[in-house]
Amino acid sequence: MTGHRTMLYSALLLLPATVLLWVFTYQPIFTTILNSFYSTPRGRRPSVFVGLENYETMIADPIFWKAMTNNLIYALTTIPFSIALALAMALLVSANLRGKGLMRMAFFTPTVLPMVAVANIWLFFYAPDYGLIDKFLGLFGMGGNNILGSVETALPAVIAITVWKEAGFFMIFYLAGLQQISPTLIEASRLEGAGFWQTLWRVQIPLLMPTTLFISINAVIGAFRLVDHVVAMTKGGPDNATTLLLFYIYQNGFAFWDTAYAAALTVVLLAILAAIALFQFGYADKRVHYR
Amino acid sequence: MIESRTSPAESIVAFGGWILALLWVSPLLYAFWTAFHPASYAVRFDLLAPWTLENFARVWHAAPFPRYFLNTFLLVTLILCCQFVICTLAAYAFVCFPFKGSDVLFMFVLLQLMIMPEALLVENYKTVARLGLLDTVLAMGLPYLASAFGIFLFRQTFKSIPKELEEAARLEGANMFQVLLRVFVPVAKPIYIAYGLVTVSYHWNNFLWPLVVTNSVDTRPITVGLQIFATIEQGVDWSLITAATILSVSPLLVAFLLFQRQFVQSFMRAGIR
C-alpha cells in the first residue's frame, strides 16, 4: 500500500478518538493553566489577567494547605494498608483452602459497588449513639462518639472506607501476579527449608514487585481522584478535616463558582499527576524488571 | 481434587481467612438485614425480627428510581458502544496503519490514563455548557467516549494477532473494514468482553462527573439519584436509606454474583498491562 493511503486511513480511523481526547483532555489542560492566571468573571465583570494572584491566594489559603495535608495523609495511609491487605487476601484465596471461591467473592464484592452506596452503608455504621461502631464502643463505656463529626476521627473514617473498597480490587492484580510465579520456585525454596514467611519475603514479594508498583501507581492516582465518599458523607467537614484536593476543586468550582481559583487548584492537581506519570515512565519502568 | 490434608497451621490460616472474609462482607450483610426489616428494628439487631418488603415499596414511591435506572442504563450503553467503536478504530490505526509520529501520538493518548476527566471537571463542565449539552445523558458520557485505556488494551491485543491472518484475508479480497471486522475483532472477543465488564461497572458506579452535569430527574443516573435521596432529611430513616442503597446496587450486584468468575477474570485481564 502506498504511504499516502496509509496516512489517510490512519487519519480517518484516529479522527474520533483524537477529537474527543483533544476536547476533553488536552484542550482543558491548556485552558485550565491559562484560566489560572485570570480572575473569575462575575456578573457583568469579565475576567481580567491577574497574573499570579490566584496562586498567591492559594499559598495564603489555610484550607488549601489543609486539603493538601489531608490528601497526603489519605494517600500515605490508604495505599500501604490496602496493598498489605490485598496481598494477604490474594495469598489466602490462592492457597488451597476450602471455600476459597466464596472468600474471593467476599473480598471482591465492595469493588463492584458504587462509592456513594458504600458511603451510605458506612454512614449508618458511623452514626452516633445508634450506629454499630458507637454501640460497640458503648459496651466498653466509650460510647457517644460522633465519628464523622469530630475532627480527629473523620479522616480516619473516610480512609477506612477507601481501604475496605480498594483492597479487594488490588487483590485481583496480586492474584494475577501470583499465578505467574512458577510453582517450582516456591517448591524449591520449601525444599531448602524456607518456611512460609521466608518464602514470602525472599521469593514471592520480590517477584511481585512489578505488580506492587503497578498497584501503587494506581492507588496514588486513585487517592487524588476519589472523592465520592467525601461528597456523600462529610462534605469536607467537620472544619475541613476531610477536605481532599479534588473535593476542594469541586467546591470552588461548583459551590462557590470561583472558577479561576478552581483552575489554579487544578493546576496543582495536574502537576501532581504529571509527576506520577514522569516517575512511572522514567524511573519505575527501568528499576523494576519485567520478565 | 486429592484428599485434603490440613495441618494445624493451615487450619489457623483458613480460620483467619474466614474471619477476614466475614468482616469484609458484614457491612453489606447488615445493610441487607436492615433493608428487609421494619424501621423499628434498624438499630437493634434481633434475629427473630419479621421480614418485610415495605421499605422497598416506600423507596420506590419516594423517588423516581425506574427513571434513574433507565438513565444509568442509557449512559452505560452509550459509553460502551462508543468506546468499542472509537477505541477499536484507533487501535487498528496504531497497529496496521502506522505513520511517522504515530508512536508519539500514542504516548499522548496514554497521558489520559493519568489525567482522567474527573481532574478537569471545571473546564469540561464549561465545554459541555458551551456545546449546550448540560443536563443530558450525552454530556455525562462525552468525556469518557475516547478511552486511552481501551485504545491501549485493544492495541496490545491486535498486535498479538499474526500478520498471516491479516494477509490471508487481504488475498481473499477483503477490504480494510472487512479485515477489521472478520479478523481482528473476532480474535479479540475475550478482551472486548473483559473490557466491557470493567467499563460497565465503572460507569454504572461513576458519580462526580454525572453529579456536576445533571440537575434534573430526567437525566440523573442512579448514583446521583441515590445520593440526593439519602441527603434529603428523612428523619434519618435508616431502613429507607439502606433499602434505597440496596435497590441501587442490586442490578450490578446480582450480575456480579451470577457471573462472579467472569467479573474477576475481566478485571484481571483488563488490568494487566
Image: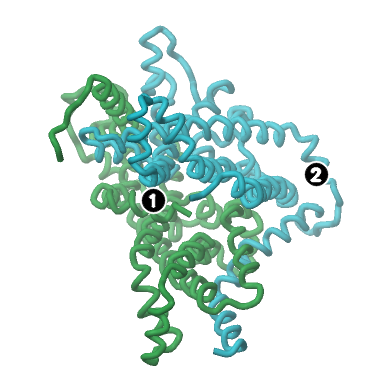
Q: Residue type at mark 2?
A: Tyr
Residue beneath disc 1: B268
Please name the colour scheme applied to the rendered image: by chain
Please state if B108 lies on the left or on the right of B5 as rendered: right
Any idea which chain is the green one in this picture?
B
Q: Quadrant of the N terminus of chain A?
A: bottom right
Tell me residue B202's x, y (percent).
43, 53
Question: Which one of the lettered chains is coloured cyan?
Answer: A
Q: Which amino acid type corresponds to the residue marked 1 in the rendered image?
A: Met
- Which residue, given by chain and number where applicable, does mark 2 sit on? A55
**Image position, residue B5 (x, y; %):** 17, 28
Task: Count residues near mark 2 (Cα–Cα under 10 Å), then give few for <14, some for 14-19, many for 20+.
Answer: some
User: Which percent across, then down, holds residue B59?
Assistant: 31, 44
Q: Does dot 2 land on a helix, a strand or a loop?
A: helix
Does A255 appear above or below A137?
Answer: below
Task: Determine which quarter of the picture holds residue A167.
Answer: top left
Which quarter of the figure has residue B181? bottom left
Total numbered circles: 2
Of residue A276 and residue B165, the one placed in the foreground of this image is B165
Q: Residue at x 35, y 71 (%)?
A: B187
Residue drawn at the location 71% of the way across and 33% of the way down: A65
- The nearer-to-camera label among 1 and 2 is 1
